[in-house]
Image: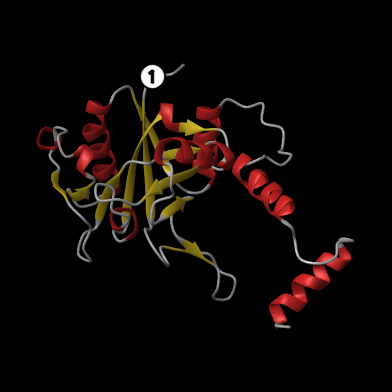
Amino acid sequence: MSARENILKRIRARQGRSGAPDAAEREAVRAHIAAHPQNPRPRADWEPIARFREQALKLASTVEEVENLSAAPAAIARYLERERLPWQAVCWAEFAGLDWLAAGIEIAAREARGTDLVGITGAFCAIAETGTLMTVSGRETPAAVSLLPETHIAVVRKSRIVRGMEEAWQLMREELGQPPRAVTFISGPSRTADIEQTVTLGAHGPYRVHIVLVGRRA
């Protein structure tokens, strides 16, 4: 008997089961996984958009709200000016058609390179409970744009804010079917406290995360 088989046999014995799982037991497990049942969750009587903004700010992200997507370039220009950042950026293809020229921003719709300092992305969805952005990789949504530049700017539609992680995964299953090659969760600027328990921003990714929320207030 292999070590793996021995471990599994001991687990089943502690569960009061004997022998290998039969077809009915295996099918019950498959049905349970396919149903994606939710475990008990904390009380969530908050409004999702307000909660997302509150949590994102706690994570050291900055947030600005605009009513429509066409206003995003001007909002991003204000942020770049305020933070004294470069007025050149790379972005996802979905934002290439916005009027960046009028905002004074030089934009390139491509994957990020090591020399790019500002990256502009969207988000598959945003999680209100934790203030987290969820992105999925793909030809039109390269992960490097949010990971390589020192500054990550995310344009997030309010309609894509979900209550919790469970709703985020459910939305992905409904819209994409199979998971993409990479799913990234972004909770504020990159940080670590590995060295002397001192929090350092930008250790493994962007120093800054700025979120532009798009959509009218409810």
Residue lying furthest left: 101
The residue tagged 1 is: 216
Give the SS element for disc 1.
Answer: loop
Q: Is residue 10 left or right of residue 29?
A: right
Task: Measuring from the top left, give residue 104's x and y in whole percent.
Answer: 12, 39
Q: Residue at x 75, y 71 (%)?
A: 8
Query: In the picture shown, does residue 84 fall above or below 122?
Result: below
Type of amino acid under label 1: Arg
Residue closer to the observer: 49 or 127:
127
Query: In the picture shown, does residue 66 fall above or below 135?
Result: above
Task: Measuring from the top left, give residue 159's x and y in whole percent.
Answer: 42, 26
Q: Quadrant of residue 67?
A: top left
Task: Measuring from the top left, give residue 187's x and y in whole percent.
Answer: 49, 50
Q: Residue at x 90, y 61 (%)?
A: 16
Residue closer to the observer: 177 or 76:
177
Q: Residue at x 34, y 58 (%)?
A: 147
Q: Is residue 216 left or right of residue 115?
A: right
Specify the color scheme: secondary structure
Q: Residue at x 58, y 40 (%)?
A: 166
Residue closer to the observer: 122 or 71:
122
Residue lying furthest top: 218
Task: Measuring from the top left, give residue 4's x and y in whole percent.
Answer: 69, 77
Badge 1: how crowded within 10 Å, few (<14), some, or many (20+)? few
Q: Quadrant of residue 213?
A: top left
Residue lying furthest front: 23
Q: Quadrant of the N terminus?
A: bottom right
Q: Is residue 136 left or right of residue 90?
A: right
